[in-house]
Image (cartoon, helix red, strand yellow):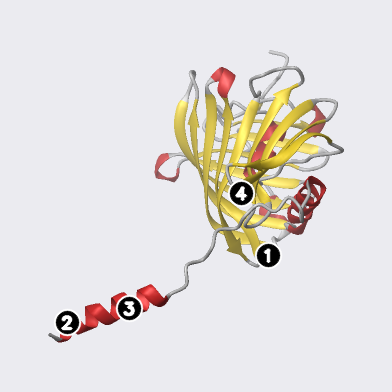
Amino acid sequence: MKKIILLALTAMLAACVPIRQAARVDLTQYDYKFLLENHNRWQESIKTLQANVRITLDSPLYSGTFNAGVLRDAPDSLLVTVRGPFGMHLGKVFVNKKRFVFYNQVMNQFLTGEREDFRNRQFLQFPVSIDQLTYILTARDRFMVLKKRAFREEDGSYFLEAENGRYRYRIWFDPAHFLIKRVEYFDLNEDTPAYYKTYENYTLIDGIYFPQLVNFVRPGKKEGLSLIFTDVKINQPIPARDFLIEIDEAATQIDLDL
């Protein structure tokens, strides 16, 4: 009898809990300029980032899963430490405003030089350039001056279609946090996106929302990356020594001319 009464009370209390209303799109109060400015402020508010990332790669040439440690110190320093099964060290990539270092620990080979020399190169089987990988790992999208083509409510989100001199964009903003949930990049005059990104499961971490799941897809080439972020720390001090890469004395330097 007591058990029945307890169950009844539990049901009554559950019925009394107010249901949280989903955020709604309000085009009269928030325009696309506000959303872009808010997105920029959100990005600029993340000064440092520390995280572990589970990366799943899928492409016609290679598929696999990696674990990586990510350290970022805004605006330019980024260190990615990639590990394979059983903690096997695969490689490290360091990028700052001027310098680039890539250390292939499996082959015991390394590259180093000016960042501009490596900006569009790909490493560690990832089907993206170093600049794209940097943006993906830090959940960043930079939009300069955009010309609006359309702004409306779509599927319960703020939807913006805009362009600049290089790309046309289709962007969906989550009305709960006014942050991007999906963005598609089109080459001008193309109907299929060159690539798109999705940001999911925004979680409040150290006072700032950050996505726990990021996807990057290049549909035309059937290539994609899926990233799951854990152990995220935002705006906590990172010692400069943590960005140092120790290269084995026996490592050979890769000659890009070969």
Q: What residue type is labelled 2?
A: Lys
Q: Residue at x 45, y 41 (%)?
A: 88
Circle 2 residue: 3
Choose top left, top right, bottom left or bottom right for residue 44.
bottom right
Q: Which residue is drawn at 56% across and 18% down?
A: 221
Q: Which of 218 and 174 is in front in this view?
A: 174
Q: Is mark 1 on a helix, strand or loop?
A: loop
Q: What residue type is labelled 1?
A: Gln
Residue 90 vertical position relative to residue 49 in the rendered view, above or below: above
Q: What element carries label 4?
A: strand
Q: What element carries label 2?
A: helix
Q: Earlier in the sequence, mark 4 or mark 2?
A: 2
Residue 227 vertical position relative to residue 211 in the rendered view, above or below: above
In the rendered image, residue 249, in percent from the top left (x then y), is placed at 63, 37
Mark carried by residue 70: 4
- Which dot, 4 or 2, sits closer to the camera? 2
Mark carried by residue 12: 3
How packed mark 4 is, by other alpha carbons closer than 10 Å (few <14, some 14-19, many 20 or more), is many
- Side (left or right) of 64 relative to 254: left
Q: Is mark 3 on a helix, strand or loop?
A: helix
Q: Which amino acid does label 4 sit on?
A: Val
- Between the residue at mark 1 and the residue at mark 4, the CA separation in whole angstroms equals 13 Å
- Between the residue at mark 1 and the residue at mark 3, the CA separation in whole angstroms equals 44 Å
Circle 1 residue: 236
Mark carried by residue 220: none
Q: What residue type is labelled 3?
A: Met
- Which dot, 2 or 3, sits closer to the camera? 3
Q: Are marks 4 and 2 in contact (CB under 8 Å)?
A: no
- Side (left or right) of 228 relative to 235: left
